[in-house]
Amino acid sequence: MYQYLPCALLKPVPVKPMWHVCCTCLVFILLSSVNLYAQDYTFPQETRYGVRLGADYELPGKNLKDSYRADVNYNAGFMYTHNRYSLEAVASYRKFGAYHGVRRDSSNPANLVTTIISPYTTYLFYISAAYNLIEGEKMNIYAGLNIGACISKSAISYFDNTTNLYLPNTDKQAYVAPKLGLTYSLGNNWHIDARASYNIFTGDSTYTYNTGTGSSGQTVTLSTTIGAGLGLLFKF
């Protein structure tokens, strides 16, 4: 029987995917463009509704930081505001790459062992409530709470001269996160939104430890991350 080995046994060697860097730069270019040209167009007076697109840089914490490196996640939301309060429905895509995506053990020349660790991918959906602590002519500072649920997937593949194993892992988790942020008006219904959050995930994790017999197990998991990023908000 082959046992599922935790990724935390691997030593970190950070590698940053270039396409994530490019996407992050694109977000900043977009924000700069809106700041320059927002005043050239006239939209109807802003109302209680808004849409937001953003990107966060997220640091893995408990039960993730030893195996996965920091990365960029992307999110989109629909917002409703009333006086000092706001309510937002958000969908987020997160993908943490492993420190050692591919690991080869050639200590035995007659039997080359290859271990492949897939990225830790999360599809997250949540409701975010916030209250404006400070309101100014152009800038508001707020605090709030995110509550939702997510599905996360990862896997380990193991190959040698006699073995070919694929060991998938699925986490179905509840999500909660306190947050702080600010919005800055660019004029003409456009806003920059900067926020930071401490993210807590807990729930059931289902893993396979013997693909030959289809044997699997289940355990309760708890993981954390810290995220901070920028978004572009348009009210209509």
Image (spheres, helix red, strand yellow):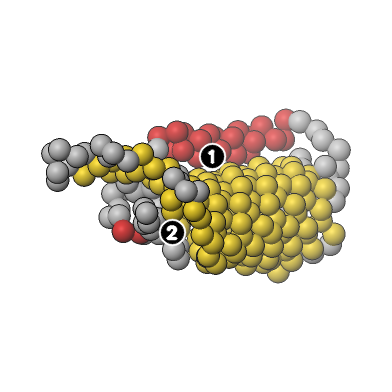
Q: Amino acid at mark 2?
A: Leu
Where in the figure is residue 55, as x and y percent of width and height?
57, 45
Q: Is residue 81 left or right of residue 134?
A: right
Rendered residue at 34%/48% (across/down):
99
Q: For the C terminus, give its image quadrant.
A: top right
Rendered residue at 51%/35% (across/down):
23
Q: Secondary structure at mark 1?
A: helix
Q: For the N terminus, give its image quadrant.
A: bottom left
Instruction: Name the residue nearer the viewer: 233 or 42.
Output: 233
Vertical relation: 186 (above or below) 181: above
Where in the figure is residue 73, as x and y percent of width and height?
54, 46
Q: Is residue 189 left or right of residue 154?
A: right
* Disc 1: CA contacts within 10 A as few (<14), some (14-19) or many (>=20): some
Rendered residue at 14%/45% (across/down):
107
Q: Amino acid at mark 1?
A: Phe
Vertical relation: 99 (above or below) 131: above
Vertical relation: 188 (above or below) 132: above
Q: According to the image, label 2 marks what residue?
A: 64
Rendered residue at 58%/62% (across/down):
204
- Please say whether residue 82 is visible from this viewpoint: yes
Instruction: Name the residue nearer the viewer: 60 or 117.
Output: 117
Q: According to the image, label 1 marks what residue?
A: 28
